[in-house]
Amino acid sequence: MGTPVEWKVIVSDLDLGEAEIISALLKSFEIDSRLTNEGGSAIGLPLVPMSSVDVLVRASDYDKADTVVEGYFSGAYEEDDPGEEE
């Protein structure tokens, strides 16, 4: 057996939709993530629809993931809409 993977919470108390967006963003940076609800159930198991969700990453990816998540919340990955007038 290999060494067990240590998972760390990178962001917490999100709704499921935003947690899935962050998970997809992390995946685009080749960072594995897992989602859990307050009760600790992993995605794939039922989540309570209105429960808060945490995003976890491997401890070894935490620093890289932190940079990605900070960029997400600061709007660094938003694209300007060329059809939108100022």
Image: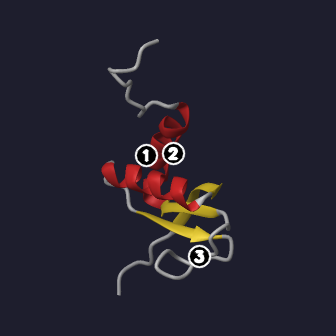
* Amino acid found under the numbered disc labelled 2: Asp
Pointers 1 and 2 in contact (CB under 8 A)? yes
Q: Observer-nearest residue: 48 or 53?
A: 48
Image x and y of residue 7, in percent: 52, 67
Q: Observer-nearest residue: 1 or 17?
A: 17
**Residue at horizontal 35 percent and vertical 55 percent from the top:** 27
**Residue at horizontal 68 percent and vertical 77 percent from the top:** 39
Looking at the rendered image, the disc whose residue lies closer to the viewer, 3 or 2, is: 3
* Amino acid found under the numbered disc labelled 1: Lys
Check disc 1 and report its element: helix, strand or loop. Answer: helix
Q: State how many labels appear.
A: 3
Please give the residue where the numbered disc 2 appears in the rendered image.
Answer: 66
**Residue at horizontal 32 percent and vertical 50 percent from the top:** 28
Please give the residue where the numbered disc 3 appears in the rendered image.
Answer: 47
- Residue 73, numbered circle: none
Q: Residues within 10 Å of mark 1 (few under 14, many from 20)?
A: few
Pointers 3 and 2 in contact (CB under 8 A)? no
Image x and y of residue 61, in percent: 43, 55
Measured along the vertical axis of the image, is residue 58 above or below residue 62?
Answer: below
* Amino acid found under the numbered disc labelled 3: Leu
Looking at the rendered image, the disc whose residue lies closer to the viewer, 1 or 3, is: 3
